[in-house]
Image (tube, helix red, strand yellow):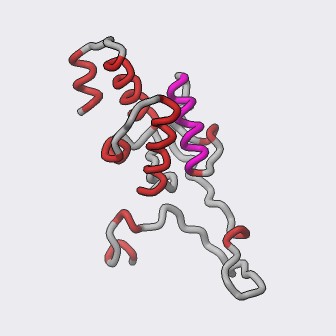
Amino acid sequence: YLSGRLPEYMHPSYYIHLTAFPLLLSGKVDRKQLPAPELPSGGYFRPATSETEQMLAGIWSDVLHIDKDKISIDQNFFDLGGHSLKAGLMKEKIRKSFNVDMPLKEIFSKNNIENIADYIITIQQMENGVTDQEEIIDILI
């Protein structure tokens, strides 16, 4: 129903069936009492192995409020509940943690830990003068 009325970026990341909404005494929805979505567990889980991937998993955990041990490095940031505001927050945490200014368009296009880690490592290598031209071009494109 929503796909016929809203653009894809406005679709909810998760649907949870509730028999009733938890309410405050004022009659408003008690958001703190809403259940957390259960992330899909299907597919092959790929844990963070490198230091960069582990640090990114920690950042994603903070931004998305998900246990970092449940985040596979090939999962899409936006499928896990991320959106443009959370992407901006992640961009800032990446800048502080890695000293790399990653443009938002790169976060949208390289939307999993594995690709973002490759991007960060490539930028750091370029800044330190370590370059393999073909590999860098492949990662940045």
Q: Residue at x 34, y 74 (%)?
A: 6
Where is residue 88? Give x, y as percent: 44, 50
Residue in the image at 44% along x and 43% along y: 91
Residue located 65% across and 75% down the image: 18
Residue 119 position, x and y percent, is: 36, 30
> Is residue 33 shown in magenta?
no
User: Which of the two residues, 75 or 89, is positioned nearer the viewer here?
Assistant: 89
Determine whether, in the image, residue 137 is placed left or right of residue 29: left
Q: Residue furthest bottom?
A: 27
Q: Is residue 38 left or right of residue 112?
A: right
User: Which contiguous range is marked in magenta?
Assistant: 51-63
Residue 54 % position (x, y): 57, 29
Image quadrant containing the N terminus: bottom left
Find the residue positioned furthest to the right: 25
Q: Position of residue 48 (x, y in %)?
A: 55, 29
Instruction: Judge whether 68 appears above or below 4 on screen.
Output: above
Q: Quadrant of residue 122?
A: top left
Residue 23 occupies which quadrant of the picture?
Answer: bottom right
- Where 98 sits versus 7, above or below? above
